Image: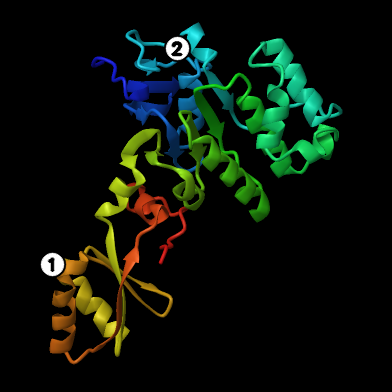
Amino acid sequence: MSAPTSGLVIETDRLTKHFGDVRAVSDLSLRVPRGGVFGLLGPNGSGKTTTIGMLLGLVRPTGGTVRLFGAATAGVRRQDLRRIGAIVESPAFYPYLSGRANLRYFHGIGRRGAADEVERLLAEAGLLAAADRPFHTYSLGMKQRLGIAYALLGDPELVFLDEPTNGLDPAGVAAVRDLIRRLGAGRRTVVLSSHHLAEVQQVADSVAILAHGRLVAQGSVDELLRNQHALRLRTTDDARARALVAALPAVGGVRVDDGGLIVTMPPERSWELTQALAAQGIYVAELAPVQVSLERYFLSVTGEASAAPTEAT
């Protein structure tokens, strides 16, 4: 593994995990910059939770190495863990204790943070009004936000959130998404594991995409999407236009969408498209650029049909 990079909070080199004959994670070389929200993306079964387990020292790697906080030596050290907060899968609390009592209990046994931290975290999670209600009466979204408050005990520099919006209704998703956005606004690094790509695109600064345990892409969202150009096209004969346009050298693909066509090609070469169509007596009714979504990019690099084929206009 190369020398540690001070601008990175997590570095892995060919990190691998086998469970018997199943290779859950393969040769993962991950680079997570300090500060902001980092999305760890992939469908269920892609190796996200196993990767988080290895980064937290909960799962022993079969091969490869991990460095946290720019450490000179590889491995998850005991002193690193006090700088980390995490929710892995579903948060577990005492059902008949209130939200406040649960946080006070875990604050006490962990001896993490100042005495007034529980009240600050309840406020940050939007739970002060429900702080004295038993945990079992909380909605799923409230439970998830209490879990995030728990992960923030001790003001950690690095926070792992594993599928924090799973099963939430739209209002719950919006509340958790807003909380995550606020958490990544300062010096803290939030690693957000999710298969909800449209949600991640709204909060993440950079991402890594896993498929079948392998890293297929990583970088800032802007970098990954910068060269993913597409045009929305409507013509006087879309059926003929589709076949004609698909044969053009500059076109990467054509698909039917919302009564028209989505054409993957550089916008600066759109003149080739209009010229070819006009030569065949097909005329353009609409031609407009489309911003390709992270979901569509995910499809292009993984081939996963589970990602919704949508674009953000």
**Observer able to see residue 90:** no
Work out which quarter of the rendered image holds the N terminus and state it: top left
| Mark 2: few/some/many CA within 10 Å (<14, 14-19, 20+) | some
| Mark 1: few/some/many CA within 10 Å (<14, 14-19, 20+) | few
Scheme of image coloration = rainbow
Q: In which quarter of the image is residue 94?
A: top right
Q: Is tag 2's residue or tag 1's residue first in the polypeptide sequence?
A: 2
Instruction: Say the numbered circle drawn on residue 191.
Output: none
| 267 in relation to 97, above or below | below
Question: Residue visible at 38% across and 56% down?
Answer: 296
- Residue placed farthest to the bottom in the image? 281
Tag 2 secondary structure: loop
Could you say where residue 265 lies in the image, as x and y percent from the top left?
A: 22, 65
Could you say where residue 54 lies in the image, as x and y percent from the top left?
A: 46, 20
Q: Quadrant of residue 261?
A: bottom left
C-beta proximity under 8 Å, tags 2 and 1: no
| 295 in relation to 185, above or below | below
Relative to 104, is 249 on the left or the right? left
In terms of depth relative to the viewer, which is nearer, 35 or 138? 35
Instruction: Say the numbered circle drawn on residue 249.
Output: 1
Residue identified by numbered label 2: 76
